[in-house]
Amino acid sequence: MAFVAPPGYQPIYNPDIPYVGPIGGGLRAGMSIYIQGKIHHHINRFQVNLQCAEFDGCDVAFHLNPRFDLWDKVIFNTFQNGSWEGEEKVKHMPFRKGEHFELIIVVNSEGYQINVNGKDFYLFQHRMPLERVCFLQIGGDVAIDTINILGGGFPGGMGGGMGVSDHTTCPGIPYSDMIPGGMTAKRTIIVRGMVPYGADRFCINFVVGGSRDIAFHINPRIREGIVIRNSLIGGCWGDEERDYFMSTKESSTFFAKLTCFALLSAIHTQSNLSCLFMYFR
């Protein structure tokens, strides 16, 4: 039984550079763009552009341009009506020659919040309307492992006929919220995320409202290469279920699709059915 990711959740792996690709549904506040890659040893510069079309010379709402020269720096700008506008220059280089990186562009109502290797780097304020942006372009001395655009392709909900229309994009961690209507039979929750460099473990818990029991606990342990499943009832953990299988590794993205049946939870990760978890009511 294969898990096919819903629209807007399909990653792009190892694209050729230069790369130009569409942003499904256009860009909106609340969306994020995750880019993982590696800087070449003999780099001069590379760029990441959020564009209004896919042809050379089109308007560019957001331009990120790390430059490795005598004075390493990162340039931000906008290209409009055939001309570059005023540069915003940061004289600090968060990228390193010959090293992997993870770049996150978080789109909010104020601008583009840039995060590099887990640290906030810069906020570039909007100069052009978000709704004009419809393409991502990457070029220069860089190799890209994955591109992920989160929150796009399905305005107003997850889509896919999964029975859950609510979605939350880029929440703070730790995250806790109500599941509207509870976790009923055949209901599906999809968690889409990225495991940062140096990560050890993370967990997803389904918590019972009044008692605070944990009906279902899934705990991927990246360094050990195992996934733990359990329940916490009345303050006591049950017997662990574990699999020595890990499709998720540090510096990678993951899908977790959790579907509730009458007495089972089915867990899909990436494109494979990982396990079934039995619970008692």
Image (tube, grey):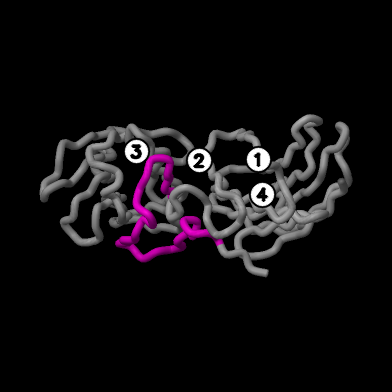
Looking at the image, is mark 1 or mark 4 earlier in the sequence? Answer: 1
Residue drawn 53% across the image and 41% down it: 168
The type of residue carrying mark 2 is Cys
Label 1, on which residue? 179
Q: Residue furthest left?
A: 82
The type of residue carrying mark 3 is: Tyr
Q: Earlier in the sequence, mark 3 or mark 1?
A: 3
For residue 179, side relative to residue 70 (left or right): right
Q: Nearer the viewer, mark 4 or mark 2?
A: 2
Front residue of this view, candidates 164 and 269: 164
Q: Is residue 112 visible?
A: yes
* Left or right of 178 in this view: 230: right
Report which residue position mark 3 lands on: 112
C-alpha separation, residue under disc 1 versus residue under disc 4: 27 Å
- Range of residues picked out in magenta: 5-34
- Residue at 33% over, 62% down: 17
**Disc number lying in front (1 or 2):** 1
Magenta includes 33?
Answer: yes
Element at label 2: loop
Kind of element beneath mark 1: loop
Residue with the mark numbered 2: 170
Mark found first going from the N terminus, 1 or 2: 2
